[in-house]
Amino acid sequence: MKKLTSFALAFALCAASAVSAFAANPTSGATTIKTNIQPTYTVEIPAQTSIPFNATSTPLATKLGLSKAQLDPNHKVTVTATVNALKNDADNTKTIPFTLYEGNTVFTSADFTDTTKKVQLSVHIAQTAWDAAPAGNYTGSVTFHIAYGG
């Protein structure tokens, strides 16, 4: 009888610990996975450029463009420029005006959406400006303005 009671208790214990794998109504579920990538970009600005005396057109040392671009859909990086005339280092009232060109037209702006577009800019100085300038060293600059938007 002891054996029968032990067997009955062991069977009851096994039956009580069993987990049912049957469900009356099959169900399913889903989860949402999200991430956010902030837009990033790196604008390559042309490096310092030396202009030979009497040169009426001199390309900037490097091209304008993006070296990195991870933008929102339908967004772009717009680059514009402000020219600051060449000024004589000894007397800044003496200047040589110049214009920034893209190809054969005056540069106004460039839009970039990826890293494939590169813009070659050049400095144009009229021969009459060279002829009117006193001797000396001159320094000027181009300030690039960068905007991001759709």
Image (tube, rainbow, N blue to C red):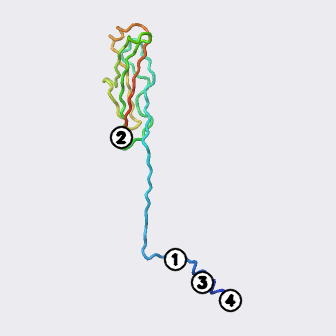
Please say if the residues under marks 2 and 1 sit with CB atoms less than 8 Å apart. no
Q: Say which amino acid is labelled 3.
A: Ala
Q: Identify the disc placed on residue 12.
A: 3
Q: Is mark 1 on a helix, strand or loop?
A: loop
Label disc, if present, on residue 3 of the rendered structure: 4
Q: Horizontal placement of 106 versus 71: left or right?
A: left
User: Is 54 on the left-hand or right-hand side of 20?
Assistant: left
Q: Which of marks 2 and 1 is nearer the N terminus?
A: 1
Question: Going from the N terminus, do you reach mark 4 or mark 3 first?
Answer: 4
The three-letter code of the residue at mark 2 reads His
**Do the numbered discs 4 and 1 sit on residues whose CB atoms are within 8 Å?**
no
Question: Residue 22: x percent and y percent?
Answer: 48, 76
Give, as a three-letter code, the residue at label 4: Lys
Looking at the rendered structure, the secondary structure element under dot 3 is: helix
- Measured as percent of width and height from the top left, residue 31 is found at 44, 60
Q: Is mark 2 on a helix, strand or loop?
A: loop
Q: In this view, does 26 lie above or below 48?
A: below
Q: Identify the image quadrant of residue 117.
A: top left
Q: Residue furthest left?
A: 105
Q: Please give left or right for residue 7 compared with residue 142 in the image.
A: right
How much space separates mark 4 and mark 3, taking CA atoms?
14 Å
Query: How would you rate the neighbour count of disc 4 (Cα within 10 Å): few for under 14, some for 14-19, many for 20 or more?
Result: few
The residue located at (43%, 67%) in the rendering is 28
Quadrant in the picture for the N terminus: bottom right
| Quadrant, the C terminus | top left
Say above or below: 92 vs 29: above
Residue 75 marker: 2
The mark that comes first in sequence, 4 or 1, is: 4
Tag 1: amino acid: Ser
Residue 121, position as x, y percentages in the image: 38, 25
Residue toward you, 126 or 2: 2
> Which of the 4 quarters of the picture holds residue 96?
top left
